[in-house]
Image (cartoon, rainbow, N blue to C red):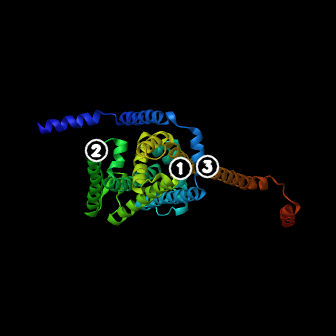
Amino acid sequence: MRHRAAALARTVLARVNWHHVGIVVSLVIIAVAVATLVRILRDVELAKVWVALAATPGRSIALAAALIVAAYGTLTCYDYFALRTIGRTHVPYRVAALAAFTSYSIGHNVGATVFTGGAIRYRIYSAWGMSVLDVAKMAFVTGLTFWLGNLFVLGLGVSVAPQVASAVNLLPPLVNRLIGLGMLAAIVLYVVWIASGPRVIGRMTWQVTLPNTPLTLIQIVIGVFDLGLSGLAMYVLLPADSQAELVAVVVTYVTASLLAFASHAPGGLGVFDAAMLVALEAIDKEQLIASLLLFRLLYYVIPFVLALSTLGAREAWLNLSAARAARERGAGADLPARLDAQPCSPAASRPAGNRAVRHNRTDS
């Protein structure tokens, strides 16, 4: 009986189109988020939102911007760490920083980060001799770093403040606390599994040796700093009289970010905002919307513009360099043809004439 059940389960899993399942899940998340936003924003007064925006202290905006710059700095560590993990140590940090910043900034806004970010990474790393397979391995390692950091931060936060997650997923606090402890336990088990010996994922040409225990801890630290700095930036932008707790804001931010990631909506638009508005309902609605608008400007819009400008400038420079190299090659190829086409100079023809004279004299 047990073997039949296992065989049936394997058959069902083999026949399920997981791509379609992912699309359905994304559409459900987006639909719920849109419905929630419509309900929440129904009685919002735009005039109060503008007043809240104008009342936000400049030092808070500057501090939030500095924290977001630092968060994007940790994103460069994702790529640099992944390059070292797959053995591509010849790629310098500046290239990893360019690829990470542009791929994440554009991927965050366009959506489907795995595909958009992968295409941008390949465009940059291919100039350093990396293949599509290398970029796919990098995506696996960066994804592992992302999820390890998310599970740790979310697991710790939900274990400490389960009622915050309950405001989003509507589960009892005890259930959320158990989920949080389960996340932490999963990380511990993974670290123990890694520590027991080298672990290799994949087959044949697609193989990745998983980072060992010390490197795995570094992965977790990178993910924690990424999420922690971003969550802290969101916290700084909240009104001073909101009395929101830092742990609650960070847990809400991570939960909202994961929902936005799962929806594949461009910039998590609607999904991220709905989760934040639901979980932080104690904060004045107009003030919270103002904070979310500022956060979107600093975390999404400005990096997106900078990334597009940087990529555009790079492509223009590459095209100009290629055109200049082509002209130089063309000029080099034309030089022998021009030399061959030149008539013999008198100086060049004189020895031949002399040889002819000498030949006649010999004959005579």
Taking the image as shown, residue 71 lies to the left or right of residue 51, namely: left
Q: How many neighbours does mark 1 have within 10 angstroms: few (below 14), some (14-19), or many (20 or more)?
A: many
Seen from the viewer's position, the closer of residues 11 and 250 is: 250
Most extreme residue toward the front, as rendered? 241
Whichever of labels 2 and 3 marks the residue nearer the N terminus, that label is: 3
Tell me which amino acid carries mark 2.
Pro
Give the number of the disc on residue 295.
Answer: 1
Q: CA distance from mark 2 to mark 3?
A: 38 Å
Residue drawn at 49 percent across, 45 percent down: 284
Residue where numbered disc 3 is placed: 54
Q: Is residue 92 visible?
A: no
x, y percentage for residue 108? 50, 46
Q: Which residue is mark 2?
A: 172
- Which of discs 2 and 3 lies nearer the camera? The answer is 3
Q: Who is closer to the viewer here, 183 or 134?
A: 183
Q: Position of residue 353 (x, y in %)?
A: 86, 62
- What SS does tag 2 mark? loop
Counting residues from the N terminus, which is met first, the one under dot 1 or under dot 3?
3
